[in-house]
Image (tube, helix red, strand yellow):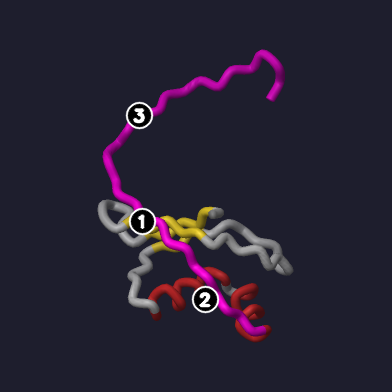
Amino acid sequence: MPEGAEIRGTISKVGEQTVEVYKMSLDLDEASREKLRADPSGVLKRFLESQGYTVNALRIPDLHANEDVWPSGWIHIPSGPDKSHWHQIYL
């Protein structure tokens, strides 16, 4: 940003919302690692659902094809308009 530039705008609270924080640990063999690289959203959604969780949305950052560093933390929104949305965080 050029020196002297200003960011103008507003921010307002739109409500209270509860979030849950989870830590995920995956034990991957080479075949499952390849599946995860090919379809990270699908693999993680199926894994969470197999553990009994509802997944209405799964937000993960774009990862490079050969990247093996996956964020282990997840924020889960249990209620409200974004119910059962999952967002990755780094713990």
Q: Image point 34% across, 52% down: which residue?
A: 19
* Residue 84 image position (x, y, % from top left): 34, 61
- Identify the residue at image location x=52%, y=76%: 43
Quadrant housing residue 39: bottom right
Whether residue 12 is situated above or below residue 65 in the rendered picture:
above
Number of the label disc, if any, that sits on residue 20: 1
Going by the numbered disc 1, the residue's amino acid type is Glu
Of 83 and 53, which appears nearest the observer? 53
Provide the residue designation for mark 2.
Answer: 43
6 vs 21, left or right, is right
Q: In this view, does 16 lie above or below 34?
A: above
User: Could you tell which of marks 3 and 1 lies nearer the N-terminus?
Assistant: 3
User: What separation in Å lies between label 3 and label 2 (alpha carbons)?
Assistant: 36 Å
User: Residue 87, percent across and down?
Assistant: 46, 56
Query: Is 5 one of the magenta-colored residues?
Result: yes
Gap in Å between the C-alphas at discs 3 and 1? 22 Å
Task: Determine crowd level at label 3: few under 14, some 14-19, many 20+ residues with C-alpha closer than 10 A.
Answer: few
